[in-house]
Image (cartoon, rainbow, N blue to C red):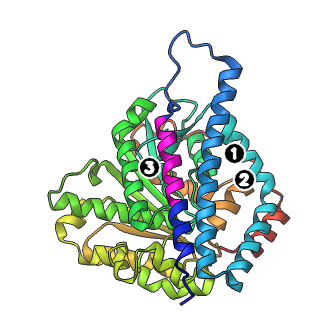
Amino acid sequence: MLPLHTGDDAREAAALLEASDLAGRRRRSSPVLSASPSPPGWDGGLRRQSSFFRQDVGHAASETYLVTRLTFSLLRYLGLGYRWMKQLLALMVYAILIMPGFWQVAYYYFYSSQVRRSIVYGEQPRNRLDLYIPEDNSRPCPVMAFVTGGAWVIGYKAWGALLGRRLAERGIIVACIDYRNFPQGTIGDMVSDASQGISFVCNNIASYGGDPNQVYLMGQSAGAHIAACALMEQAVKESSGQPISWSVTQIKAYFGLSGGYNLHNLVDHFHQRGLYRSIFLSIMKGEESLSSYSPEIVAKESSPQTIALLPPIFLMHGAADYSIPSSSSQTFVDVLHQAGAQAKLLLYEGKTHTDIFVQDPLRGGNDPLVEDVLSRIEADDVTCGIIASAPTPRRLVFEWQLKLARWISPF
C-alpha cells in the first residue's frame, strides 16, 4: 500500500473539493445554454454564437482544471510511482501521434450544427450531456445513450465525439453522458450520475427528435462498467418495487465495449498496469464495496424477477486487450447465461483496448464496431430507412501514425 498523508494534505483536498462544489453552484446559478431550437425572431448573430462558444469552452475548461488539480493532489498523497509516470508519458506521446485526427474531430465537435453540447441533466457540476443529431431527422430516430471511459479518473463526454459522429451519420441520435470522475466523486456518484443521465434521455429525447421506444445503452471501458452498474442497480430497484425515474424495459439493448465487470478479478491487474491498488480501492469506496459494484456478482445474486427485466446484452472486446482482459466479458456473459439473461460476446481478434474505439474509426472505411451495433439496431428498426445509407468515412490519420500509436498506447 502506498503512503497516504494527512494533516495539511487532507485540508488541502477538502478545500479543493469545496472549490469544485462552489464552482458547480456558480455555474448552475448562471443561465443554462439551451440545446433547443431558437425562438422565432431570434437574431443574436455571430457575437451571440461566439459568446455561447466561449461559455461552453469555459465551462469545460473550468471543470477539467478542477478535476485535474484534485487528481494530481490525490496522486501526490498516494505517491507517484515509476509505472504511473511511464503510463503518463506514453499517454502524452499517444495523444501527439493521433493529434491530426483529434483536431478534425474537435472541429466537428465545436462547430457542427448537428452537435448540441452541454445539455444539463442534473444538479451536479458534471451533469451534462452532448447530443449528436442526424441531418435527416424527418422521423423519430433511434437513440444511443453512451457512457464514456477514462479509468474512472479522466472520463469526459467529448471522448465519445468520434463514435457520436459515426452513428449520427447513420441516422442514430447519440447522447454522450458526462459524470463526476474521481476524486470529484467515487463510483457511487458515477453510477448515480450515469443513471440520471439515462433517465433524462429516456424521458426527454422525444423533444430532440429521438424515438423514446428505441433507446439503447452503451459504455466503453470504465464507462461500460459504470453503465452496467446503473443497469443492474435499476433492475434490482424495479423488481423490488422501489421508486424509479426510468425503467430498464425502456432500454432495447445494452452494448458493453471493453469493460470489466468483476472488480475482485481486476484489482491486482490494474495495480500492475499503474492504477495502484490504493487509488483503485479509493475510487470503489473500499474493498468491502467491490462486490456491490461488480455487475457480474450482482447478476449472479439477483432474483429471476430482476434478470427477467434485463434487455439483451452484447459485450464487445478485443482479444488482444491487455488493459482489461477479454476474459472479463467472457465470464460476465457466462454468468448472465446461467442466470437466464440474453447475452452475447463479440470478440475482435487481434484488437487492443484502443483499436476498436480509437484507431479503427480514425482509419476510416468500414468500422466493425459501428457495423455490429447498427446491425442490432437495424433488426429492431422495422423501417430501416435511415440506417441503410451513409457516406464512407474518410481516413483521419496516416497509417504509420496509427501503428506507432497502437504500439505505444498505455491502454
- Residue at 76% x, 52% y is 101
User: How far apart are labels 2 and 1 at the CA level?
Assistant: 8 Å
Please tell me how crowded label 2 is: few (under 14), some (14-19), or many (20+) other residues with Cα within 10 Å: some
**What residue is shown with label 1?**
392
- Label 2 or label 3, whichever lies nearer to me, is 3
User: How far apart are labels 2 and 3 at the CA level?
Assistant: 37 Å
Disc 3 residue type (three-letter):
Gln
- Label 2 or label 1, whichever lies nearer to me, is 2
Vertical position of residue 148 compared to residue 94: above or below: above
The disc placed on residue 124 is 3
Image position of 335 (left or right of 306)? right
Vertical position of residue 348 compared to residue 62: above or below: below
Residues shaded magenta = 17-29
- Asked if the magenta segment contains residue 21, the reply would be yes
Please tell me how crowded label 3 is: few (under 14), some (14-19), or many (20+) other residues with Cα within 10 Å: some
Name the element at disc 1: loop
- Residue at 32% x, 78% y is 297
- Residue at 51% x, 41% y is 26
User: How far apart are labels 3 and 1 at the CA level?
Assistant: 39 Å
* Percent coordinates x, y for residue 277 in the rendering: 52, 84
Residues at discs 2 and 1 in contact (Cβ within 8 Å):
yes
Vertical position of residue 329 compared to residue 134: above or below: below
- Asked if the magenta segment contains residue 66, the reply would be no
**What residue is shown with label 2?**
364
